[in-house]
Amino acid sequence: MRNPFTLGIAQKNDFCNRKKEINDLLQHAKNGDNTVLFSPRRYGKSSLIARIIEQLREEGYLTVYVDLYPITSEQDFISRFSNGIFKGIGRGADTRTIADRLKNIFSRLVPSLEVRPEGYNISARFDRTSQTGLLLDDLLDGLYKYVKKEKLRACIALDEFQEITELPDSKKIEGILRSQIQFHKEISYFYIGSRRRILTDMFTDKNRAFYKSAFSYTLKEIARDEFVPFIEAKFRKTGKVCPSEVAAKIYDTVRGYPYYVQKLSSIAWDITIRKCTDEIVFESYTLLLTMEKTDFEGIWGGLALIQKSVLKAIAKEPTTSPYSREFLERHRLSIGGTQKAMDVLLSRDLIEKDDEGKYRLTDPVMEAWLRE
Ligand SMILES: Nc1ncnc2c1ncn2[C@@H]1O[C@H](COP(=O)(O)OP(=O)(O)OP(=O)(O)O)[C@@H](O)[C@H]1O
Ligand SMILES: [Mg+2]
């Protein structure tokens, strides 16, 4: 029997129902609003957005999904974005009708059709020496014209959106995107990313183009009462048993962090012959720690001494008041150094503030590793 757990994008039966999130986000899209979707890495943003896009597509929306990781240049950005939009426009068309659909919409971007035995591939060609701004205007104007002409609604998801800030002329690109997007009520956008500080700055800094232009939505862990039965069912469907209190143990051990829940379940499933137990979960967790260790060591090695001390202190003792005298004394930290280090650790998303206002490590497994 194949291992029923997955570390990739969760699709179809691998997708544990995020009912509320799906509802909320669909609502934003249908209202024509734009949304920033944030969560730490591997929380399920891409899986969730794929669901949303699929749903909207079934309802007749023109949908576009673009992964901006990694973009290496402005041309690369234009190329990915326009390929995504061309594909969105072309969806459902055959080699004959696609040319018609794309005719007279764009002036600088030229559709390029590559026919293959299994279908065709559509992409955009353009003069690489053209100004990025002109190309972007052409792309978004063209899309808008098409949407209007066909009386459609559209939804565009830009995954790993923070990557555009890495481009040399990113401020200009932000400006052009914003000026186009704000007039297009028929088109809603999802900006998705895992770098909280960078995204927050983009959308809350008065001097930035995207200032207050989108709803902000933070994706949390998958709810316990959805994920625990999901784990049980996966075991059951593959002829094994995982009692609900053991499935809950898996969930709690990694704080419901979707990627780790899948990974820990997967390891436990491999070890389980027939029935999963607490001991198996414990053994699996030890294995998980060993697997993740190299990554953690890499991150650890890149930190300054004081950052290491603060990270370790927070791992050992998540706290609402890292600057209190007691906390600093207990961990032998200085106030000035701790403040600076906290800033770096927060901006790198190694630390986060939880719902109770407590600073803790974003990654529960790294936290356990540091406690050892
Ligand atoms: N709804 C879900 N049900 C079950 N597992 C899920 C769900 N969403 C995500 N996962 C699991 O979580 C992990 C991360 O998923 P995904 O790649 O969608 O997250 P992400 O936030 O886009 O990650 P990244 O920051 O790396 O882009 C995968 O192992 C995936 O199987
Ligand atoms: Mg992703």
Image: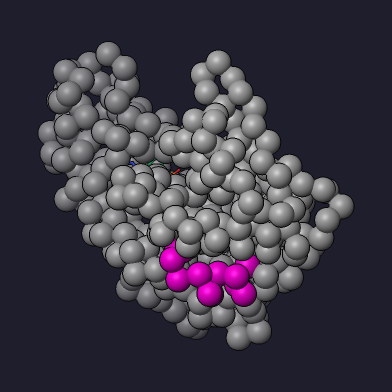
Residue at horizontal 72%, vertical 71%?
Answer: 171
**Viewed as shown, does residue 121 lie left or right of 260?**
right
Is 358 above or below relative to 227?
A: below
Magenta highlight on residue 130: no
**Viewed as shown, does residue 226 lie left or right of 95?**
left
**Viewed as shown, does residue 132 lie left or right of 52?**
right
Is 265 above or below relative to 79?
A: above
Measuring from the top left, give residue 213's x and y in whole percent.
51, 77
Q: What's drawn in magenta, residue-wise?
A: 177-188
Measuring from the top left, give residue 290's x and y in whole percent.
49, 33
Measuring from the top left, give residue 309's x and y in whole percent.
59, 62
The image quadrant where one finds the N terminus is top left
Magenta highlight on residue 180: yes
Measuring from the top left, give residue 367's x and y in whole percent.
45, 52
Front one among 63 and 284: 63
* Image quadrant in which you'd find residue 206: bottom right
Residue at horizontal 34%, vertical 49%?
Answer: 60
Residue at horizontal 54%, vertical 37%?
Answer: 98
Is 52 above or below relative to 290?
A: below
Front one among 277 and 198: 198
As drawn, which residue projects farthest toward the bottom?
A: 206
**Viewed as shown, does residue 325 lie left or right of 10?**
right
